[in-house]
Image: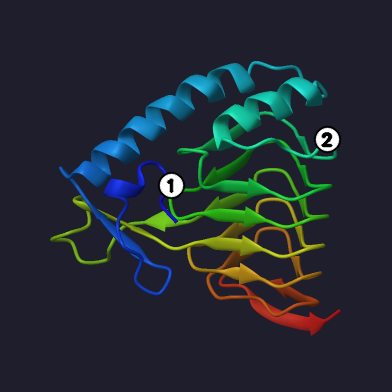
Amino acid sequence: MFRTDPEHAPAPTQDRTVIHSRTPESRAAYAEIRRAWEILGRLNALPPGDFDAMRALLGELTGQELDPSVRVLPPFHTDGGRNLRFGRNVFVNHGCTAMDLGGIDIGDDVMIGPNVHLISSGHPLDPATRRSQITTAPVRVGRGVWIAAGAMVLQGVTIGDDAVVAAGAVVTKSVPPRTLVAGVPARAIRAL
């Protein structure tokens, strides 16, 4: 999932990777973060509603052209951008954070509420390695998903097609299609 430099990309282990500090992989990640900061500075200075300019800068950030139907409102934050993919007809409200080091794939017809966090990276629990390693696993958001205000989706989670994540939920496990989840940690409330 790490797309900066294939020669130095860590080998995934069942969709999960570990990046060690002071390695070519960590230096490549830091270079990507610095590149993203520069682009995000310009992107977040745009007035809300300037979607053409927003898509152009998101295209620069992700390295791909975005569909004209994609709408993202600033501020928007990410740690690299190259591992972030937007489908068609995606709406992202103010204050989204998409930590994409492990990869984030947002399907078609997705709605993301204000202040949502999509987090595909973290750190080991072991105090001996916590500051020297980054763990990653992809976040996958299926077609037609609605992630409501203030929700958080953590690394390794897949949200099935047409599912709904309630406001303020913390999603730590994958969500089946057409399911409403809510709570901390998020639990299935009912089928849709």
In the rendered view, tell whether residue 6 sits above or below residue 40.
Answer: below
Q: Is residue 78 left or right of residue 9?
A: right
Q: Position of residue 165 (x, y in %)?
A: 72, 65
Kind of residue indicated by mark 1? Arg
Q: Position of residue 53 (x, y in %)?
A: 74, 20
Q: Going 30% across and 38% down the picture, which residue do you hit?
A: 28
In the rendered view, tell whether residue 56 sits above or below residue 66.
Answer: above
- Tell me, for residue 109, which label it has, or none: none
Please say if the residues under marks 1 and 2 sit with CB atoms less than 8 Å apart. no
Q: Is residue 47 left or right of residue 6?
A: right
In the rendered view, tell whether residue 180 sits above or below residue 61.
Answer: below
Q: Quadrant of residue 102?
A: bottom left
Residue 48: in sight, yes or no?
Answer: no
- Tell me, for residue 68, which label it has, or none: 2
In the rendered view, tell whether residue 173 sits above or below residue 67.
Answer: below
Location of mark 1 (residue):
3
Q: Quadrant of residue 107?
A: bottom right
Residue 110: in sight, yes or no?
Answer: yes
Kind of residue indicated by mark 2? Pro
Q: Position of residue 144 (x, y in %)?
A: 82, 62
Q: Going 17% across and 45% down the picture, which residue do you hit?
A: 23
Q: Position of residue 73 (x, y in %)?
A: 74, 32
Instruction: Looking at the picture, tell me which residue is in the foreground, 124 or 43.
Output: 43
Q: Going 77% across and 70% down the picture, which residue do you hit?
A: 161
